Each structure stands twice: as C-alpha cells, then as structure tokens.
Amino acid sequence: MNGTETKRRYRTVFLSDLHLGTRGCRADFVAQFLRSVECERLYLVGDIVDGWRLRKSWYWDAEHDEVIRLVLRMARSGTEVTYIPGNHDEMFRAWIGLEFAGIRLAQEAVHRTADGRRLLVIHGDEFDSVVRYAKFIAHLGDWAYDAALAANRWFNAARRRFGYPYWSLSQWLKRQVKGAVAAIDRFEVALAQEARRRGLDGVVCGHIHHAEMREVQGILYMNDGDWVESCTALVEHADGRFELVDWARENRLSFFRGEATPVPQPA
C-alpha cells in the first residue's frame, strides 16, 4: 500500500491466530492488512504470539516487529485495542485486567455492534476438549500441523510458478478428514450454545483456523480464521454489517516465503 491509497475504515476489526514466533506466520501479510485499515476497535482474539513454539526455538524477524509496532501505533492513535489471550499465548493470562501501552488484556469480552447486538468475543480453546484435557495430544497435533504447513508452502510455490493464486492445501486436507470436520462442527455448536446460555446474540472466536460466518441454532457464529493458512480477518462495518476479509485471495498474494507481491495473472 502506498501513501496515496485510501485506508479502509471499519467500526471493528477482529484478528486471531497470527502465531507470531513461527515460520508459518505470514507477518508480512498481517502488516500489509494493518497498514490498510483504520478502526475504532481492534480485538486480538488469541494466539497472537506463539509461546509454545518460542519455548522450543526462537524465531522472530523484522516483519514480526512490524506487526507489533503497527498495533501499538493504532492504540496510540485512538483505536481501542483488546487482547484476549489464547492457548498458545496463555502466558499473558496471568496479566488479565491490566493495560500495557493502550492495549487491554481480557479473558473475554462482550462486543455491542452498531445495530445493538451483543456478541461474546473469546478465543475458544476453553471449548476444545483436546486442549483442555489432553495437552500432549494437542502438542502432537501441533507437530502434524507444522508438517502440513510445510507441504502447503511448497505446494503454493509450485502454483505460483504457473501463475495461480494461493490455495490452502492444508485446509483442504483438514476438510477431507471426517473427524476434523465433525470436530469443527462440535466446536461451533458449543460456542453458539455458550452465547445462547449467556443471553447473547452471537459469538466471535478463533482457535480452529477455520474462518466462518453462519447461524447456528439461531445464534450468529463467526470465526475470524488465522494468518498462517487462510489470512482472514473479520470486520464490522459502520452499520453493524459483518464481513470476512480474505486478504491473500483478495490481493492474489503468493504464500511462497519472501514473496509478498501480487501473483501474475495466467496468460
């Protein structure tokens, strides 16, 4: 984005699952997105920093620094920033209720939309039985997920050579596994039921890296996705209308490391 382009203005932006500190994180795309928007409220809905990965090995580059810098700049410029830690950045849960550099840490939040609806904003790992009751299995799944992401990068490098835009092989593989599809459905239903139990109109969450916006048993369920596989954000417009922004597909960006430029159109 150059200095002559007009920023997109939203009432609210929801981002989650950046996984800063991992090689799979597309911090360069996150930075592009943040530079392109202005909003009144920014919710960071968990797994922004990947403490699990950083404890194993340190990975942090200039693009990761840039994402932090842009979020801090938004907070200084008047954007209300709320950080809701997830399971990968659970170390920040010890500081719930505190505010740092204009960023408020919260266990969860209730967001009131422009048209008066009330939405539960929560990372969602509390409703994932694997994370809650079998952390070893969760870490094993994390290893398998890293392998799928590595395959995804090489697959998209090949697509780019032929002029095709990004397509998530890892998400496609996940959708082919019936158990994964069923688990996603159970997760969505559980979150919708929790919102209903609290007398709320809907829920915004992350955690499962599956961007979605649909009605579940009369409750609005919205998952803002991630910035490892899909690079999606959930945004609220001034009139209370919600939209999932598919940043990589919208801008035809390559997911080959080091290439954050538009993919050339096939001849």
Image (cartoon, rainbow, N blue to C red):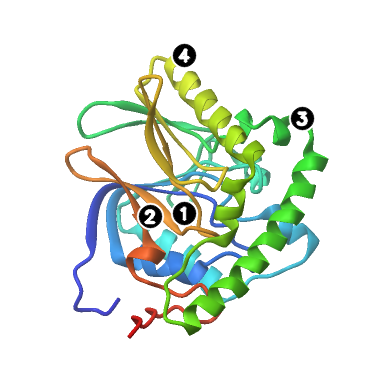
For disc 1, the marked residue is: 101
Q: Decide: marks 3, 1 in contact (CB < 8 A)?
A: no
Q: Secondary structure at mark 2?
A: helix
Q: Decide: marks 4, 1 in contact (CB < 8 A)?
A: no
Quadrant position of the N terminus in the picture: bottom left
**Nearer to the camera, 35 or 69:** 35
Residue 75 badge: 2
Crowding near pointer 2: few (<14 within 10 Å), some, many (20+)?
many
The answer to which of marks 4 and 2 sits earlier in the sequence is 2
Q: CA distance from mark 4 to mark 1?
A: 34 Å
Which residue type carries mark 3? Tyr
Q: Is residue 252 left or right of residue 44?
A: left
**Nearer to the camera, 42 or 212:** 212
Q: CA distance from mark 3 to mark 2?
A: 36 Å
Give the residue drawn at x 74%, y 48%: 141
Q: Is residue 189 left or right of residue 55?
A: left
- Image coordinates of residue 93 in percent, x first then y, are 63, 39
Q: Secondary structure at mark 3?
A: helix
**Nearer to the camera, 196 or 167:** 167
Give the residue drawn at x 55%, y 79%: 158
Residue 197 badge: 4
Q: Decide: marks 1, 2 in contact (CB < 8 A)?
A: yes
Q: Secondary structure at mark 1?
A: loop
Q: CA distance from mark 4 to mark 3?
A: 23 Å
Give the residue drawn at x 32%, y 85%: 267
